[in-house]
Image (cartoon, rainbow, N blue to C red):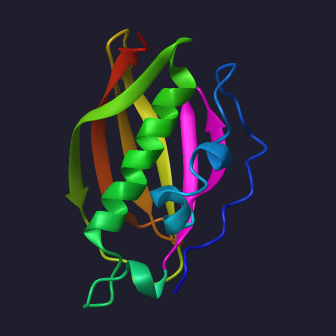
Amino acid sequence: MPPAPPPPESTAESRAPGLPSFQDRHRLGLAAHLGMRIVEQTRDRLVAEIDVRDDLLTTNGTLAGGAIMAFADICGGWATSINLPPGSFTTTLESKTNFFAGCREGVVRAESLPLHRGRRTMVWQTRLTDGTGRLLAQITQTQMVLRRQ
């Protein structure tokens, strides 16, 4: 199955001046392959969705843990990007995932909330739920804030 087309840009957008839109930044990468859609983004909350598709499943028919982790990592990284000072960029320093349930179909929603927004690091917690609101996974990641030289 070919990668999903880029998602439409969210209307609830708030980003730093000069930061490209999510769609522009991720039009060819893993986010595009996952089919990520930004539902809401502010400096305090990021919500995104993906559709469960056959090419994202394990041989047991559930959404792959790697797809879950990648989805959450991109969400936390983008949430950090929205909060960066001018001339900065970010990279993931650490990530921890707890898996609670499998998902075989439907839409998976990620909600990223800040736990810490410092000058050198930011920590985001991302909760992934299925269409019924059942918790699938919770990811806590630390993003390093780097200055362009």
Q: Which residue shows up at 37% across the image and 12% down it?
A: 118
Toward the viewer: 61 or 148?
148
Q: Residue furthest bottom?
A: 60
Q: Residue furthest front?
A: 149
Q: Main secondary structure of the magenta part?
A: strand
Q: Which residue shows up at 66% across the image and 51% down it?
A: 39
Query: Does residue 10 appear to the left or right of 105 in the view shown?
Result: right
Quadrant in the picture for the C terminus? top left
Q: Residue furthest right?
A: 11
| Residue 54, horizontal then vertical, whole percent | 44, 87
- Residue 103's image quarter? bottom left
Residue 136: tell me if it is visible.
Answer: no
In the depicted structure, whether residue 120 falls above or below residue 29: above
- Residue 104's image quarter? bottom left
Q: Check if residue 42 falls in the magenta segment.
A: yes
| Residue 49, horizontal then vertical, whole percent | 56, 61
Give the total of numbered labels: 0
Q: Check if residue 3 falls in the magenta segment.
A: no
What is the span of residues highlighted in magenta in the rendered image?
36-52
| Residue 96, horizontal then vertical, whole percent | 20, 46
| Residue 108, horizontal then vertical, whole percent | 49, 67
Query: Does residue 23 appear to the left or right of 73 in the view shown?
Result: right
In the depicted structure, whether residue 14 falls above or below residue 70: above
Q: Which residue shows up at 32% across the image and 12% down it?
A: 120
In the depicted structure, whether residue 8 falls above or below residue 80: below
Residue 79: tell me if it is visible.
Answer: yes
